[in-house]
Structures are given as C-alpha cells and as structure tokens.
Amino acid sequence: MTVLQFHNTLTRRQEPFAPVDPAHVRMYVCGPTVYDLAHIGNARPVVVFDVLYRLLKRTYPKVTYVRNITDVDDKIIAVAKATGEPIDSITARTTRAYHEDMGALAALPPDVEPRATAHIGQMVAMIRRLVESGHAYVAEGHVLFHVPSMSSYGKLSGHSRDELIAGARIDVAPYKRDPADFVLWKPSAAEQPGWDSPWGRGRPGWHIECSAMSEEHLGETFDIHGGGLDLIFPHHENEIAQSECAHNGKPFVRLWMHNGFLIVNGEKMSKSLGNFFTVRDLLAKWPAEVIRLLLMKTHYRAPLDFTEDGLRQARVELDRFYNALQKFDPSCRLYDLDASLTPPADVTDALADDLNTPLAIARLHEHASAAFQSAAASREPSPQVSALYAGGRLLGLFNQRPETWFKGQAGSGLSEDKIEERIKARLAARKARNFAEADRIRDELKAQGVVLEDGPGGTSWRRV
Ligand code: AMP
Ligand code: ZN
C-alpha cells in the first residue's frame, strides 16, 4: 500500500498518515455558509479536498467524507433582513447553486452533508456537557466557553495569550469572564431564527456547529479535518477546545490540513477591490476543467494567484492532453474501461507526498510526451496514453471525450451553428473555385480560435 504523507498544521511537520482505523478513514471539511454564491476562493478547498478524497478512496477500503452546510448564521440573517427573502429560501437556493457549481468542477459529493439546523439537539447536548464540566458558563442568555479552563488552548494556531485576546472576533462583551471567551449559544430576538434550550430561545455559535456535527457523523476522534488557512484561528482552535473538553480530553483530530489563499493578480480577492469572481461567472466563460486544472496547478499550501493568463495556460495544457487522448485512443476505449484502470505510480506517488498536485500534473505531461513520441497511433490505446488517462482521472480530469472537449468549449466566441455555417460557405466557395474566398473564411475562423482540418471524410474543426 502506498504510504501517504501530509503536512499537519498541528505538529507543523509532514507525517506519515496513520488512520485510527485503516479499514475506515474519516474526514471532515468545513463547508459553506449558504447566503451567497460561491466564489473561486471557496472552490479551492473543495477541489483540494476532493483530490485528497479521491486519493484516500484509492488507498483505503472505506472513506467517510463529511462536509457540512452552515445554514444558521448572522450573515444569513442579515441577507434576509436586507432583501426580504425568507431564510429557508435563501439557504435552499444557495445550497442548490453550491451543489451545481462544485459538481461542475467535478468535485465528488461528500458521503454526508449535515445541515447545522438539523443538529441543534446535538449542539445543545454538547454545550450542556461543557457547562456541567466547568468549561462553559451562562451569562445574560449567552453560553460562553471559558478559554482559561483549557490549558492547551492555542495549540493549533500557536497564538500567544495576547494574540488570542487581540484576535477575539467579537468585541469584548461586558458579560465575558475573559476577553478570549467565545460564544457557544446566543439569544435570538423574536424575529430571528431560534430554538428552545435550557438557556432560553436562541441559536448556536458557528464553532459549536462543526464540533457537534463531526461528533455525530465521525465520532469523538477522527483522522482528518480540513479547511482554508483562515479557519485555523479562531474556528478550528475553538472546535478543538469544545470537542476535547466535551470528551474528557480525548484527542479530537489527528491530522489538520489547511489550504492557502487564492489571490487575484497578486491582490487578495475581495468584493470591495472589484476582483471578485463567482464560480458561476467563471463557468460561463471557461470550461470547468480549465478552472479545476488551474486550482490544482499550485500546491495546496501555497498562495494561488488566479489570473486570466493562468486560465489560458491551463486550457492549452488540457488541449495537449485531449489531443494525446484523441490521437492515441481514437475509439475512446479508455473511457469505457475507466474504473478498472490503475493510475500510474508516479502520479500516485506525487499525491502521496503531501498532495503534490503540480508534480502530478507535470507527470501527466511526461506521459503525454511519451505518447506523442511513441509509435504511430493504433486502435488499441498505448500504455503511455493509458497512464495519462488514468492519472488524469485520479485528479478528476477527462470528464468528457476529446471530441466534446474540442467542440464544446464555453466562452470561445463562435457558436457551433455559426461555425458549421461558415464551413458550408467555405465549401461552396471552393466548389465555385473561389479559393481566395475559401482561404479568407478559414483565416477568419482561425482568428476566432477555430481551426479547420480537411480530411477524407470532410472538414472537421476544433477550438484552439
Ligand atoms: P466561508 O463560506 O467564507 O466560511 O468559506 C468557505 C471555505 O472557503 C473555507 O474553507 C475558507 O477557508 C475558504 N476560503 C474562503 N476564501 C478563500 C480564498 N480567498 N482562498 C482560499 N480559500 C478560501
Ligand atoms: Zn467548521
């Protein structure tokens, strides 16, 4: 069995991966707060942990991947208030859009997708345990976690006590015993969503949601917890505090993995800078695999610069892969064999080394080069092109056949109908022996990114 190694944020080292139960690997990734369309930054952890999930599924007999939906949060309440749209409608609509967008990027659905509002009972039970064991206290309708009650608090982020206080998300409320204490439960006004609890009608804080949902679906100790770098503090630090204190100090998570930020043209992506892209907008302009490949071309822990040039380059790389597939597997046998194929060891090894996707992609290029250098095309796929295909599948690529890839690229200008019409016009010009006009049409199409190829069966085309 391939030995997987990953960088652990908790120990700040790369370590061999050793699941609690090798017969069943368990992973939790923080999912979206559903009030808005996902932006491309949100898609980064989804694609990163999708690659990890695919690798784990190849390596272990059973993997349970849990990714939650945060459907109760002050940001959702604020949108409902500003627009008048009911909360249920906002969360249902946004969850649906999220599924569509992430599905388009070929991210496999998680095995369990728990919604926070369906786990309020588990959250209340956990908060109750924390109060009973002296780790939490009630103050003015709030329940707060008392940070000094846990001596190892801060071990994930490595924050000092001063940083903890400065970083406390909410203004220091007068009812807090310690400025670093954080909310587990807060009261809801009549018009806000709320549930009955031993502390009155209220709603959970964000951090307790993930502690309760991971306990429910993965148990008290599980293997991997993931999310973006921004979640290390306070979110994940607080999840550790809640879960370990509610479980008598039992370790919560063995391996913490965090993806780096996505930045745009060197600047942090944000709405106010106007450099903000939703996944949906990008999907209207670019093939989904171009976006996915670009997200994988940078190692997950490094910052990822998301640029138009990067998208163009990713498209060229995919064209090269699909060209090799089309040429060396003309009858698409590989697509039929699919699940029975084994990815090449060099691609698996790259991923096994802290999910080195850039190296895995470089190795796909080597397999493509080897295919191009190999003997002439034959009806049977060559070993080189089989390696390219199976390695790409492990990365979630090649979700379409080459023909569809070359014809169906979104955002390339001309529609298929228009291209076919121009090809007919060119044919008519040639029949009339007006070769100048025929060449002009060919050049015009080329300028618009469409290349014509004349063959015995007629004229075919592809986008470049
Ligand atoms: P949110 O809905 O803001 O809690 O974010 C959902 C996920 O997207 C979290 O794992 C965040 O860390 C991640 N995320 C948000 N913005 C970015 C970004 N610019 N780059 C990378 N990951 C991000
Ligand atoms: Zn979380």
Image (cartoon, rainbow, N blue to C red):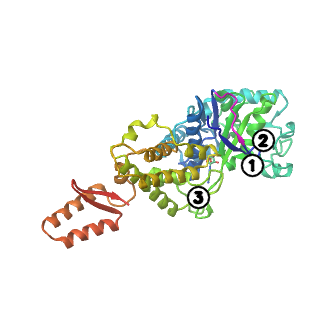
Residue 414 lies, in percent from the top left, at: 32, 60
Q: Which residue is mark 3?
A: 271
Element under disc 1 = loop
Q: CA distance from mark 2 to mark 1?
A: 8 Å
In the image, taking residue 216 as reference, residue 107 lies left or right, namely left
Task: Look at the image and say whether residue 20 sits in the magenta stretch.
Answer: yes
Q: Is residue 354 magenta?
A: no
* Mark 2: amino acid: Phe
Of residues 313 and 160, the one nearer the viewer is: 313
Q: Position of residue 434 (x, y in %)?
A: 16, 71
> Which image quadrant for residue 153?
top right
Q: Main secondary structure of the magenta part?
A: loop
Assess disc 2: are there few (<14), some (14-19) or many (≥20) residues with their C-alpha within 10 Å of its C-alpha: many
- For the residue labelled by badge 3, is the local secondary structure a helix, a strand or a loop? loop
**What segment carries the magenta color?**
15-22
Q: Farthest residue in the front direction?
A: 375
- The kind of residue tagged 3 is Lys
Residue at 38 percent of width and 37 percent of height: 336
Q: Residue at x 64, y 54 (%)?
A: 261
